Amino acid sequence: MSAPDVEITVTSPEQMRELGRRLAGLLRAGDLVMLSGELGAGKTTLTRGLGEGLDVRGAVTSPTFVIARVHPALGDGPPLVHVDAYRLSGGLDEMEDLDLDVSLSDSVIVVEWGEGKVEELTEDRLRVRIERAVGDTTDEVRHVTVTGLGERWATADVRVLAG
């Protein structure tokens, strides 16, 4: 079960952050967002905006070397768990081995490079693919495809992300 894909063209890093802020408005505790795209595509920039929208503590930076960072909520919202799964070979077991001091079901989890690694966390997930525009000479234009999977996203209006 999945919702229709939403396709968005982003022309600057600030627009990517704004997309992250809009995405934050759709998310709640227990949600899993899987980000894919080549190096430099904008996965961390999108997550920065998401952190701003969720109003979490700490600067959102790439967790490549620490694998995961927990950003506690400053208000009533859920914390953000930002994971870079590039170096992870397993899924749920390896996530639990990270000894995160939050319950995954009480957090919004964003996983970069998560495809094929963390799907077992939940059937309900949001997949965000970021691709550079072919022939873009400025290297700024990105095509973002958002796909909601599972019952959670079947009725959610992800079209709001496009506007």
Image (tube, grey):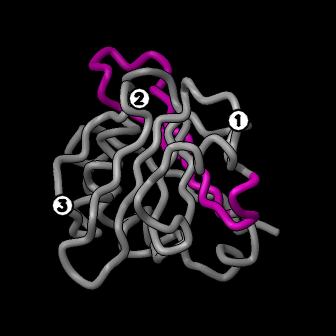
Q: Are marks 3 and 1 in contact (CB under 8 Å)?
A: no
Callout 2 secondary element: loop
Mark positioned earlier in the residue sequence (3 or 1): 3
Callout 3 secondary element: loop
Identify whether 147 is placed above or below 55. Answer: above
Q: Are marks 2 and 1 in contact (CB under 8 Å)?
A: no
Examine the structure image and report whether residue 74 is included in the region drawn in magenta: no
Question: Which residue, given by chain and number where applicable, does mark 3 sit on?
Answer: 57
| Eye-nearest disc, 2 or 1 | 1
Residue 118 vs residue 160: left or right? right
Identify whether 146 is placed above or below 114. Answer: below
Q: Amino acid at mark 1?
A: Gly
Tell me where the magenta segment starts and ends, as one range. 120-148
Q: Amino acid at mark 3?
A: Arg
The quadrant in which the C terminus is found is bottom left
Identify whether 91 is placed above or below 25. Answer: above
- Residue sitting at x 52%, y 30%: 37
Mark positioned earlier in the residue sequence (2 or 1): 2
How many marks on residues? 3
Mark seen at residue 90? 1
- Of 67 and 29, the residue lying toward us: 67
Question: x, y percentage for residue 6?
Answer: 57, 58
- Of 142 and 54, the residue lying toward us: 54
Question: x, y percentage for residue 50?
Answer: 32, 58
Examine the structure image and report whether residue 121 is included in the region drawn in magenta: yes
Question: Gap in Å between the C-alphas at discs 2 and 1?
Answer: 24 Å
Question: Which residue, given by chain and number where applicable, does mark 2 sit on?
Answer: 41
Residue 47 vs residue 30: left or right? left
The quadrant in which the N terminus is found is bottom right
